[in-house]
Amino acid sequence: MRAVVIDDHPLIQQAVSHLLRQLEPDAAIEMTPDCGHGLELAGHGPEPDLVLLDLNLQRIGVSIARA
């Protein structure tokens, strides 16, 4: 499983990463606090199975989710 976590709160990133590793120990988890970088991560390499996006991130999270 490949997951991209886009959230600017380190505690949330750590908690989500921990939870995903509990469910899928071999998961490839990439984390970033930046929407632009998150889109780059999601667009490179194999398509992610899961993208978690903070909808309030940088006031553009909702716009990205709608796209």
Image (cartoon, rainbow, N blue to C red):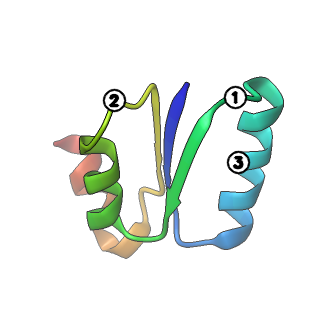
Question: Which residue is painted at 32% across and 44% down in the image?
Answer: 42
- Asked which quadrant contains residue 59, the reply is bottom left
For residue 18, the mark is: none
Question: Which residue is painted at 33% across and 59% down in the image?
Answer: 61
Residue 44 image position (x, y, % from top left): 26, 43
Q: Are marks 2 and 1 in contact (CB under 8 Å)?
A: no
Residue 66 image position (x, y, % from top left): 22, 42
Secondary structure category for the residue under label 2:
loop
- Asked which quadrant contains residue 62, the reply is bottom left
Q: Quadrant of the C terminus?
A: top left
Residue 38 image position (x, y, % from top left): 35, 57
Mark 2 is on which residue type? Pro
> Would you say 18 lies left or right of 6 here?
right
Disc 3 marks which residue? Answer: 17
Mark 1 is on which residue type? Asp
Q: CA distance from mark 2 to mark 1?
A: 15 Å
For residue 26, the mark is: 1
Secondary structure category for the residue under label 3:
helix
Q: Quadrant of the N terminus?
A: top right
Which is closer to the viewer, label 3 or label 2? 2
How many neighbours does mark 3 have within 10 angstroms: few (below 14), some (14-19), or many (20 or more)? Answer: many
Q: Nearer the viewer, residue 61 or 19?
A: 19
Disc 2 marks which residue? Answer: 46
Q: CA distance from mark 3 to mark 2?
A: 19 Å
Residue 46 image position (x, y, % from top left): 33, 29
Check the image and report above or below for 19 versus 57.
above
Which is closer to the viewer, label 1 or label 3? 1
Check the image and report above or below for 49 versus 18.
above
Question: Which residue is painted at 70% across and 48% down in the image?
Answer: 16
